[in-house]
Amino acid sequence: MSPRHFSILFLSQRVALPEVALLVSVIAPQAPSDSGVRWRLGTGPIRATGVGRDPGLGTDLVASALRGGRDAEDCDVVWELRVVEKGLRLLGVGGYYLGTSRPLFLAFSRAMGDSSSRGLANQSYLNKIDKLRELNVKTIDLPQLVVVGDQSSGKSSLLESLTGFSFPQAPGLCTRYATQISCRRESEKKVVVSIIPRPGADAAVDIRLRAFKRNISNLENEGLGSIIAEANIVMGIRMTAEDTDSGLQAFSEDILKIEISGPDEEHFTVIDVPGIFRVSSPPLTTDSDVALVKTIVESYMGNSRTVILAVLPSNVDVTTQEILKMAEVADPGGTRTMGVLTKPDLVTENAMQDAVMELVLGRRNPLKLGYGIVKNRSADDQHSTKAERLAKEETFFREPRWQRIESSGRCGIGSLKTRLQDLLMSISKKEFPHVKADVGKQLRQRREELEKMGPSRTEQSSQRMYLGRLGSRFQAITQCALNGYYSSESVFTELPGLKLITNITKSNERFANDFWRKGHKRHFSVKWDDEGEKAYDATAAEVGEGNVPFEVPISTYPELHDILDTNAYRCPQPTAFRLPPFGSISILDHIDMVYQSNRGSELGTFSSAILGITFKEQSEKWEPLVLAHVSESIALVHDYIYKLLAHICTERQVREQLWEDILLDELRKAYVQAMEQARFLLRIERDARPSTYNHYFNAEVQKKRQGRLNQAKDNAQQVRDDILDILMSYYKVSRKRFVDVVCRQVISHFLLEGDDSPLKVFSSELILGLDDDQLERIAGEDGETKRCRSMLKAEKKILEAAMEVLRG
């Protein structure tokens, strides 16, 4: 059998008992015996004696004593404990035994300590959250309880019951903006009305709105109505259709804050947002106002730390309510949405009443936080006291038609408020460390952004200092990038593409590998003998296509297209050593053709011009390979410079002026030099007379000749083989030399480390050479920069104040 909560009755007379008062909810699968009730509480069982039988508030109640016990393994009643308010108070717990009409009434008490039911420490959490909300920390989501619903859903009446605050009923009041109502227990009874400016309000508006503050000693509608009317004027709200001022608005994103203090108040904060409506009423509201209200409501509901209190009239089918659909979008898991059913007195049909009770009992359209139900004050009941209203509500839910849910613990404003207080406290305590971490993180970010911007730049000295600081920062990070000291700077974690020397090394290795495997036009032999080169019939997959293992951003920078070789060169495979008939010409055939067309009267030798001709023809792929590699390297360097500058110089105006007016021309000069050096090296290596002083050449020639000594050949064949041996040996020497020279001179010197390297363009020497006009044009602060600096300072100030609140 499922457990059931019994209804709870309270005794208010004060008695002198020496124990602490406790509120106990009963969950009883079986009815307890008449003599002695045993139950589990906390860490161990407790026995209560003295069971009274009077469920009312009469004088026959018997006070029971609490004392420890250990023989409760067979207990059949579970008790749920909650400490209540300060004082010596006798409490009664009443209800009915499960499945019977026999009343059960238990009573016991102990003296309370000094504080409210939830303790001073718990209040401290809520106080800090409210102070953060007052600071308007717009970038931090705060734990909050927000009441949402359609217009005329009963929101105002519900809020009045929760807070004791009677909302003025005049048109235009308390419906045009979010209203934060905070109740506090203090010795003095007072009400303070103020305005929290909307996020993003400019300085003048912020000062004007924060200057509004009114204090009253009571909650009379007449006085409060006039104060709220003043607040509407300050916020620029159009209160009636007769207001023709074009500067007025129907709704505002500002927040009206109402603080209610008094000795009988409990710590409680709730935010009311404008009710959803779908049809505008020109000229008071427009279609844009409909969209604005929905945006305001969605922004509050979308806060992951918001408890959504969805107000739903009981006389309307909840499946048709848009507010529940919006809550489902904002809270897909349903972990922070609670439904509150209002106006149950308007439900007259039995079927509709059953549907409402099914919702409250969680048997229909369930929410994880469930539904509560309250009775609104009727339209003709505007002068009853809070106690009278609660009594009428209690009487209403005792009617037979609502008997199924009377003892559910979800009926009435008292039950709802207790649940909401516990829920708000729970989420506040849970989210408090995360809020503190978010504030700390954003405070660090604002300080870093301001540090990047540097001091205000209104004079030439500060402008030059600012650019000099950027240049020094650029050079420091670049040294780490060239030396591979990536752990020294966080930028390499944030932007891995800035690991320059790693990318350049990979590109050089790919270039050298392509040169080794595919740089020659024709294979020199069927099988390469000493360097692991593949045979002519190796597959493309084995040889590889020479792809760079990262993106080379040549196409990203059109300003380089007239300098670089932008055609993506894919080096073809060399021609095979021997080919079948009708195929391409092999290297032996080619050598024979060159020899026959260039031979002289030499006996057993050949002209040195033949070696130059065959070498140039064999190395014809070198030029596109080299120019493509240098172009890729320039693109990598250029991309590094541009992205690093964007990282260290967050001001777009400064960055663009510095890039376009100063850096780009100097960078282009450096890139042109690198490309010219690559072409110069190609001319030297391919067009000049072949020569080398490397002993490896002679050793290689001798080794190849030694392998042919036992083969009988005629003079022409011998000369052809000698040409092939010398060509192959010289090609290997030249290739090794040339790859190193390109990587050392063009890449390392001209692009990375030389005095004229593009990486050294943005330097202190460059900054010192700028004239006054250039400084002002580049580093002078424009309006956007000034506004950005002002905003960062304001946010930093707010976040520092928020951190002080959280640490307090």
Image: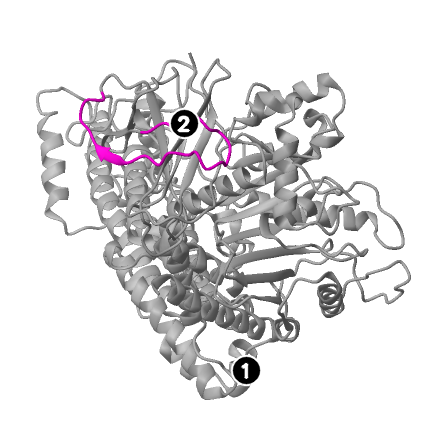
Kind of element beneath mark 2 = strand
Circles 1, 2 touching at the beta carbon (< 8 Å): no
Name the residue beneath numbered marker 2.
26
Residue in front for this viewpoint, 369 or 729: 369
> On the rendered structure, is 134 left or right of 700?
right
Kind of element beneath mark 1 = helix
Residue 729: in magenta span: no
Count of marks, rendered view: 2
At label 2, the amino acid type is Val
**Residue 134 percent coordinates (x, y):** 53, 63
- Magenta segment, which residues? 50-72
**Residue 167 percent coordinates (x, y):** 70, 55
At label 1, the amino acid type is Glu
Question: Up-down: is 23 above or below 53?
Answer: below
Residue 69: in magenta span: yes
Name the residue beneath numbered marker 1.
776
Secondary structure predominantly adopted by residues drawn in magenta: loop
Location of residue 776 (image quadrant):
bottom right
For the residues labelled 1 and 2, the Cα–Cα distance comes to 78 Å
Residue 576 visible in the current orientation: no
**Residue 327 percent coordinates (x, y):** 60, 35
> On the rendered structure, is 276 left or right of 108?
right
Question: Up-down: is 718 above or below 569?
Answer: above
> On the rendered structure, is 412 left or right of 228?
left
Question: Up-down: is 693 above or below 104?
Answer: below
